[in-house]
Amino acid sequence: MNAPYLLSVGYYPELLHLRSHLLRQNGYVVKEAGDFQTAMTMARNDGSNLRLLLFCHTVPSADQTQIMMALLGSHSVPTLSICQLEAARQVPGKPVSVSPEALLAEVKQALQKEQFDLPPVYNVRL
């Protein structure tokens, strides 16, 4: 039997590995999916052990939706989507990013949520 885990999905390997490393250092069991097909396979085959689905901003919305829908057959799971830009907070000429502290706080908050009928999307926009 596999242990409960977080699935981190991102299409930029360096960001994916860095985010997963941060989460592992803070006690989380993390599996990575660096492409759509891997994420779909993991969602379908091992979704019952999944506790949080974490999407990088590099994953298109359409892919996020399909991956979440693949999970609905087995159960619902909180979803955390990291959005890189938000017009209201964006400073012209400066990239917007999520700090490690903010990411850890959002992951903790998302994991404390109860089960949902549909996976909610928590948008981290800093």
Image: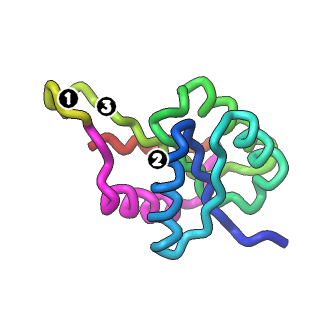
Rendered position, 44 above or below 65: below
Q: For the N terminus, give its image quadrant.
A: bottom right
Question: Whole-Å distance between the Cαs marked 1 and 2?
Answer: 24 Å
Question: Which tag is nearer the camera, tag 1 or tag 2?
Answer: 2
In whole angstroms, how far apart are the C-alphas of marks 1 and 3?
9 Å
Residue identifier under label 3: 85
Q: Is residue 66 magenta?
A: no
Residue 112 visible? The answer is no
Quadrant in the picture for residue 73: top right
**Residue type (three-letter) at the residue carrying disc 1:** Ala
Q: Residue at x 52, y 49 (%)?
A: 16
Could you tell whether 124 is left or right of 24 in the image? left
**Mark earlier in primary sequence (2, 3):** 2
The answer to whether marks 2 and 3 mark residues whose Cβ atoms lie closer than 8 Å is no
What residue is at 39 percent from the left and 36 percent from the top? 83
Give the CA separation, mark 2 to mark 3. 16 Å
